[in-house]
Amino acid sequence: MKIEKSKYVSLSYVLSLDGGEEVERSDPKEPLGFVFGFGMLVPGLESQIEGMQAGESKKVVVEPEDGYGVVVPEMIRSVPRDQFQPDMEIEAGQTYASQTAQGIIRFTVKSLDDKEVSIDLNHPLAGQRLHFDVSVSEVRDATEEELQPVLADCSSGDCGSCCGDCG
């Protein structure tokens, strides 16, 4: 059986960057399981594994535009230091989360002084070429129970990248 829309896929992966730095890897005992074709992976990886079968492995390179996007300079901002809790320890290079009216946002601190904190709202991997080493362990028809959450997201308009072409 081949990977295609609405199939349940289980795969192991290692994600690294151009310099060879490993960023993430799946637990060897618990491969990543998901229903394919509903935007649950970065688009460049999803398009490259379509058609693979259980037992196959592949090295995939994903350009920034098809991964976590390019760095958007307007998403790097200066925020007054007093917008943070006074006793909060803030360090350059660290990633933090904050609750806003729009939900939780994540940001990385670029630099700071006593008056301002420069934050980057881009995804931490924005602008990076991604190197995936993937091994497919399972491809099968998704059960109704597995399909229900992704189809519910689509019907509510919260469809990730499937853009209304769900089901």
Image (cartoon, grey):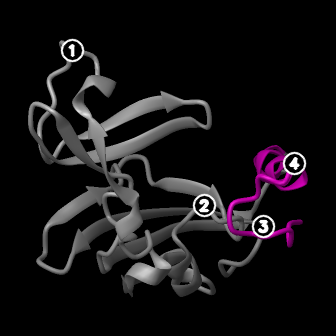
Residue named by callout 2: 40
**Magenta segment boundaries in residue numbering:** 145-167
Amino acid carrying label 3: it is Ser
Q: Distance between the residues labelled 4 and 2?
A: 16 Å
The answer to which image quadrant residue 160 occupies is bottom right
Looking at the picture, does residue 70 appear above or below residue 59? above
Please provide percent x and percent y for residue 114.
10, 31
Crowd around label 1: few <14 · some 14–19 · many ≥20 (10 Å): few
Q: Nearer the viewer, mark 1 or mark 3?
A: 1
Q: How far apart are marks 1 and 3 (CA)?
A: 49 Å
Q: Nearer the viewer, mark 1 or mark 4?
A: 1
Residue named by callout 1: 86
Nearer to the camera, 2 or 66: 66
- The disc at residue 6 is 3
Is residue 18 left or right of 108 when viewed as pictured?
left
Is residue 111 left or right of 100 when viewed as pictured?
left
Looking at the picture, does residue 126 appear above or below residue 124? below
Please provide percent x and percent y for residue 27.
34, 49
Nearer to the camera, 151 or 10: 151
Residue named by callout 4: 156
Circle 1: element type: loop
Nearer to the camera, 77 or 89: 77
Q: Are marks 4 and 2 in contact (CB under 8 Å)?
A: no
